[in-house]
Image (spheres, helix red, strand yellow):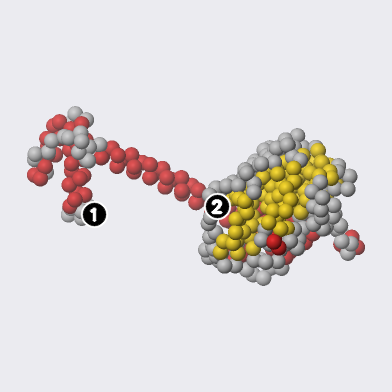
Amino acid sequence: MAPLTSVLSERQKEELHRALLDYLSSNGLQSTFEALKAELPAHQDFQPDPKAKWTGLLEKKWTSVIRLQKKIMDLERENGLLKDELASVGSISSTRKGQQLEDWLPGRGGGARHTLTGHRSPITALAFHPTFSSLASASEDCTIKVWDYETGEFELTLKGHTKVVCDVDYDSKGTFLVSCSSDLTIKLWDCMNNYRCTKTLYDHDHSVSSSRFLPGDTHIVSASRDQTIKIWEVATSFCVKTLRGHTEWVRGVWPWTHGKLLVSASNDQTARIWDLTTGESKIEFRGHEHVVEIALFSPPASNAAIREMAGIPSPTNQDSKIKEPDPVFVATGSRDKTIRIWDCNSGQCIKTLVRSEALKMRTKRRRVDE
């Protein structure tokens, strides 16, 4: 039988021979050590040396091989799971126009257009200007930065907060930017005057985690770790209403764009809808098993797709002619790794999304928008 062709270079062979001799010697296999040394004329003078680079090399290589084998097995198992997941959404992988799912998923069209660098700590929030190509970013470095997202250029840094900036939001006209911080304050920045800070609002007793302009831009809503939600009048800087109901940190608050309603998310594992007119909590969504980080009203255009996904009958032809003035569904995202869809009238969870279910939801949403 012809000898196999070696894939090792001469240098690698030398290192392997030394490693073998070292292993045999260090493990007391003296007769085998002497026999191998006799078979290797180039190593007749080999003596074990604890400081040599080949000492313990065989064990290290063997351990590395075992570790790599385990990683390969883990990757193969994960690959199998991903294939199964892909197969589970295969039936909905084409849109009404025949487009493939992968053709419109974010990131499929190439790399990032711009990478904006400049903050010295993690970024906590982003807000697009409604008119200009400006993007505001909030950061744990206590600053807000404004960028031109068309060119990727940095424009200016807003300094004023003394702790983490938690959130930013432009008003509907892009005249003002509101920010909130762990320094217990909310600040208003005049976008038409080089983002000069014009007002600082004080009344929260702990970190302010969220701030948003309400429809009409005359009021601001904020959420805080002090377990409250506050409504502020922009013209006077006064807190005109405090909403209480959550029993732990209120992570965020989001207004309904078509009326006087809010939805909030909290560490108490609930989300709530609030009536801005009365300041009362209208309904509580309870079912998550961890902190609820985000809650959003569904836009009217998505209601049909949500009903289809949840198996809820659509309104009759006569009912469908009437616009739905109030939100119909709320989506919440939690640290329990689930997204839940809730009925705003009954407060019941109508669907829990996990992994592939989220892809199905996005596909149906796209069908509605086309």
Local secondary structure at mark 2: loop
- Which x, y percent locates residue 156? 60, 59
Q: Residue at x 74, y 61 (%)?
A: 175
Identify the amino acid type marked 2: His
Mark 2 against mark 1, which lies toward the viewer?
2
Q: In 3D space, how far apart are the residues under numbered discs 2 and 1 (Cα atoms)?
A: 50 Å
Residue that lies at the very extreme toward the top in this rendered image: 28
- Residue 38 at least partly seen: no
Mark 2 closeness class: few <14, some 14–19, many ≥20 residues within 10 Å = some
Going by the image, does 314 lie left or right of 145? right
| Residue placed most toward the observer, 359 or 275 | 275
Instruction: Quarter of the image for the C terminus: give it.
Output: bottom right
Of the image marks 2 and 1, the number of the one nearer the N terminus: 1
| Residue placed most toward the observer, 45 or 249 | 249
**Cβ atoms under marks 2 and 1 closer than 8 Å:** no
Instruction: Report the residue marked by disc 2.
Output: 119
Q: Residue at x 57, y 47 (%)?
A: 141
> In the rendered view, would you say 106 is above or below 239?
below
Q: Residue at x 23, y 54 (%)?
A: 7
Identify the amino acid type marked 1: Val
| Residue placed most toward the observer, 308 or 229 | 229
Instruction: Report the residue marked by disc 1.
Output: 7
- Which x, y percent locates residue 240? 84, 45
Local secondary structure at mark 1: loop
- Which x, y percent locates residue 81? 54, 49
- Which x, y percent locates residue 309? 73, 55
> In the rendered view, would you say 352 is above or below 5?
above
Q: Residue at x 63, y 60 (%)?
A: 135
- Residue 47 at least partly seen: yes
